[in-house]
């Protein structure tokens, strides 16, 4: 269990479209004077990359930025991310130990209004994590 966790005020619902997992390259290639290249495993545990998108409001985006800059000291620390809703075997108590591989990015999706008053803007936020062993 991580000592720093994803803020409870941020969404955990990951959009299935655009979700990707990239396996770690955990193989060392050795060249010999004769014969084929030799392959061997580097380590027993290797981080792998996960990228996905989620929807956030302006307030949630501001919370994410504060979490990245202040709590994670400019995204340099690892933290627990709940895996609820990710994959067929995920349970509500599972979490990944992750750190950001890239700064989060956002793209405008829609503006929610009531009459002439803007209630909130909705953003598509792209996140790329390194899942630690």
Image (tube, rainbow, N blue to C red):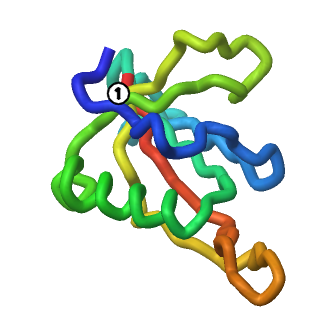
Query: Is residue 94 at least partly visible in the picture?
Result: yes
Residue 128 vs residue 55, the one in the foreground: 55
Query: Is residue 34 at least partly visible in the picture?
Result: no
Other residues around mark 1 within 10 Å, as few (<14) / some (14–19) / many (≥20)? few
- Secondary structure beneath label 1: loop
For residue 117, which quarter of the picture? bottom right
Quarter the N terminus occupies: top left
Q: Residue furthest bottom?
A: 116
Residue 120 vs residue 69, the one in the foreground: 120
Q: Is residue 133 left or right of residue 24?
A: left
The percent position of residue 89, horizontal first and vertical second, equals 73, 12
Above or below 114: residue 76? above
Residue 109 vs residue 126, the one in the foreground: 109
Q: Which residue is mark 1?
A: 42
Quarter the C terminus occupies: top left
The residue depicted at 57 percent of the width and 36 percent of the height is 23
The percent position of residue 82, horizontal first and vertical second, equals 52, 26
Q: Is residue 73 left or right of residue 78?
A: left
The residue depicted at 19 percent of the width and 56 percent of the height is 70
The percent position of residue 67, horizontal first and vertical second, equals 31, 52
The residue depicted at 51 percent of the width and 58 percent of the height is 60
For residue 68, which quarter of the picture? bottom left
């Amino acid at each position: 269990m991580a000592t720093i966790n994803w803020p409870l005020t941020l969404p955990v619902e990951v959009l299935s479209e655009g979700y990707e997992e990239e396996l770690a390259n955990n193989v060392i290639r050795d060249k010999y004077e004769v014969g084929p290249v030799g392959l061997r495993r580097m380590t027993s545990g290797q981080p792998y990359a996960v990228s996905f998108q989620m929807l956030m409001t302006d307030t949630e985006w501001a919370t994410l930025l504060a979490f990245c800059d202040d709590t994670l000291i400019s995204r340099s620390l690892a933290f627990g991310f709940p895996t609820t809703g990710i994959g067929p075997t995920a349970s509500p108590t599972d979490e990944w130990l992750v750190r950001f591989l890239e700064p989060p990015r956002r793209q405008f999706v829609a503006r929610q209004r009531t009459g002439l008053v803007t209630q909130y803007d909705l953003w598509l936020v792209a996140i790329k994590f390194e899942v630690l062993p």
